[in-house]
């Protein structure tokens, strides 16, 4: 795995038009290494020129200064059930040789906490149309509650909320009778080895995603909603820190483990 050398946060609406177009070029280059099925214009509309009230993009750079990954966080402020609600959406991509460090979690948590502190008591939700099992597994791992999930069908009030959010953002189902599998079009470029890995995994969230959304390889997304609270986001931060600490401890243990010795015959 290659190491990331730097990170930079940009706010598209504060950039000049020329700078935004260069940003689109950089991000779309990364995107095309990871996904297919979306043209540059549509990508720019979703990621850089989003209609969200707040958009922040963290760029990940190589030692040569090239953009090799990104995460875009959008917060939309919409009228939902008679009051203003915040809806967080996100897009992310990282070139395969730089993956593995899970560098986007801190940024997402930081943006959410800052926003929620500035708007106390505002109903806040994460909304995703997730096109890969790894994305769903990450959300389910850290959020207090995520719907749908392997343990229970969405309660009636949550199912209604999910329908309201889907309608608000123009998310349409692939087929009638299954509102959770939606049309997206982004397809992750997985190798045969990647797909075999996901089929073999015992991770319950990955297995659930693949059972619910077997057409993800065709660009279908799983409509995913997580109600958020400041306390819940703080707990997610604790889980994230714990995960990082366990990974660090395993690395230290491996580095200090006794090495087998050999002797000449």
Image (cartoon, helix red, strand yellow):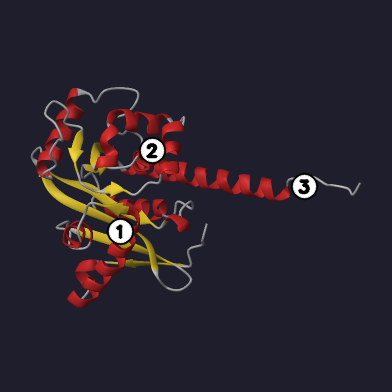
Q: Position of residue 50 (x, y in %)?
A: 17, 58
Element type where label 2 sits in the image = helix
The answer to whether residue 117 is visible is: no
In the image, farthest residue toward the left: 82
Q: Is residue 168 above or below residue 211?
A: below
Q: Are marks 3 and 2 in contact (CB under 8 Å)?
A: no
Q: Is residue 140 above or below residue 71?
A: above
Q: Is residue 27 left or right of residue 94?
A: left
Few, some or many residues within 10 Å of mark 2 (<14, 14–19, 20+) = some
Q: Position of residue 214 (x, y in %)?
A: 29, 32
Q: Viewer-nearest of labels 1 and 3?
A: 1
Where, by quadrant of the figure, is residue 27 drawn?
A: bottom left
Residue shown at 21%/34% (left/top)? 181
Q: Is residue 208 left or right of residue 39?
A: right
Where, by quadrant of the figure, is residue 151 drawn?
A: top left
In three-dimensional space, the C-alpha distance between marks 3 and 2, rounded to whole angstroms, equals: 35 Å
Q: Position of residue 134 (x, y in %)?
A: 38, 42
Query: Between disc 2 and disc 1, whose residue precedes?
Result: 1
Element type where label 3 sits in the image = loop
Where, by quadrant of the figure, is residue 82 drawn?
A: top left
Q: Position of residue 209 (x, y in %)?
A: 33, 32
Residue shown at 21%/58% (left/top)? 43
Numbered circle sitting on residue 137: 2
Q: Where does label 3 land, which residue?
A: 259
Query: Between disc 3 and disc 2, whose residue precedes?
Result: 2
Q: Where does label 1 land, which residue?
A: 32
Element type where label 1 sits in the image = helix
Query: Between disc 1 and disc 3, whose residue precedes?
Result: 1
Few, some or many residues within 10 Å of mark 1 (<14, 14–19, 20+) = some
Q: Viewer-nearest of labels 3 and 2?
A: 3
The answer to whether residue 116 is visible is: yes
């Amino acid at each position: 795995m290659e190491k990331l050398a730097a990170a930079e946060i940009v706010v598209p609406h504060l950039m000049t038009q020329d700078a935004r177009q260069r940003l689109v070029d950089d991000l779309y280059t990364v995107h095309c290494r990871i996904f297919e099925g979306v043209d540059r214009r549509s990508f720019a509309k979703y990621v850089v020129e989003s209609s969200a009230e707040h958009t922040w993009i963290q760029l990940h750079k190589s030692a040569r200064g090239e953009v090799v990954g990104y995460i875009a966080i959008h917060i939309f402020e919409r009228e939902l059930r008679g009051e203003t609600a915040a809806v967080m959406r996100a897009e992310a991509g990282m070139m395969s040789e730089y993956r593995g460090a899970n560098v986007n979690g801190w940024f997402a948590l930081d943006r959410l906490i800052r926003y929620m502190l500035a708007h106390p008591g505002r109903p806040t939700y994460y909304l995703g149309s997730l096109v890969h099992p790894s994305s769903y597994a990450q959300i389910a791992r850290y959020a207090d509650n995520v719907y749908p999930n392997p343990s229970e069908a969405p309660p009636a009030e949550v199912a209604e909320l999910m329908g309201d959010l889907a309608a608000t953002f123009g998310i349409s189902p692939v087929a009638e009778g299954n509102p959770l599998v939606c049309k997206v079009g982004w397809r992750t470029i997985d190798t045969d080895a990647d797909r075999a890995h996901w089929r073999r995994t015992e991770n319950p969230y990955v297995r659930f995603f693949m059972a619910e959304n077997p057409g993800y390889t065709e660009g279908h997304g799983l409509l995913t909603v997580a109600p958020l609270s400041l306390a819940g986001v703080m707990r997610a931060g604790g889980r994230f820190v714990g995960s990082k600490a366990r990974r660090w401890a395993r690395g230290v243990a491996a580095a200090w483990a006794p090495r087998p010795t050999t002797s000449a015959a």
